[in-house]
Amino acid sequence: MLAEIHEHLESALPSDHWDTVAVAEDIDAMSALAGQLPDRSLILMPWRERAGSQSLATGGFRQRVEVQFATGIVIREYDQFMGGDRAVRFDELKRDVEAALAGWEPPSGVEPCELIGGESSPVAKGVSIFVQTWATARFLTGG
């Protein structure tokens, strides 16, 4: 499913606003990658999966799995770009991500994407990241 989300973001984000859409394995890799990527990059990362109980009482197997993933918006600015200015810039860029993901359903999913929350953090001198957590769902089926 992560590959589907990555492909969708690459095609849905306006190319004049974004430099790169990368994928990271975990939060440590996301943080390290944020320090290396250019300004206006987006990092996609798997977050967690949470399974519900198996729903079929007789025959077969069907289990709903909530799939959470994170997107990190990288801002790289060394001038006098601080505090409130960075917040405004994050706000402008996150509109693109939210427009691309909110309500979109991955082809292998069973529910549209919805935003769970977001938070910003400095990564290195002149580099900050705004990470949003998203959720969708899929079914795990078996014999």
Image: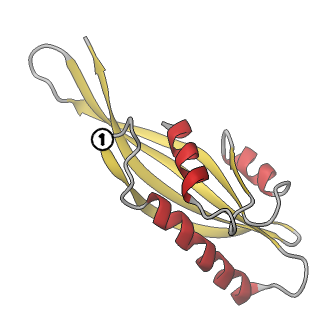
Residue 1 in the image: above or below residue 32: above
Give the residue at x 82% y 56%: 37
Q: Which residue is mark 1?
A: 110
| Residue 46 screen position, x and y as percent | 56, 42
Image-quadrant location for residue 137: top left
Furthest residue to the top? 143
Closer to the camera in the image, 112 or 119: 112
Amino acid of disc 1: Val
30 relative position to 64: left or right: right
| Residue 25 screen position, x and y as percent | 67, 39
Give the residue at x 70% y 63%: 18
| Residue 48 screen position, x and y as percent | 49, 42
Whether residue 117 is visible here, answered yes or no, is no
Give the residue at x 37% y 48%: 105
Residue 49 in the image: above or below residue 97: above
Closer to the camera in the image, 28 or 127: 127
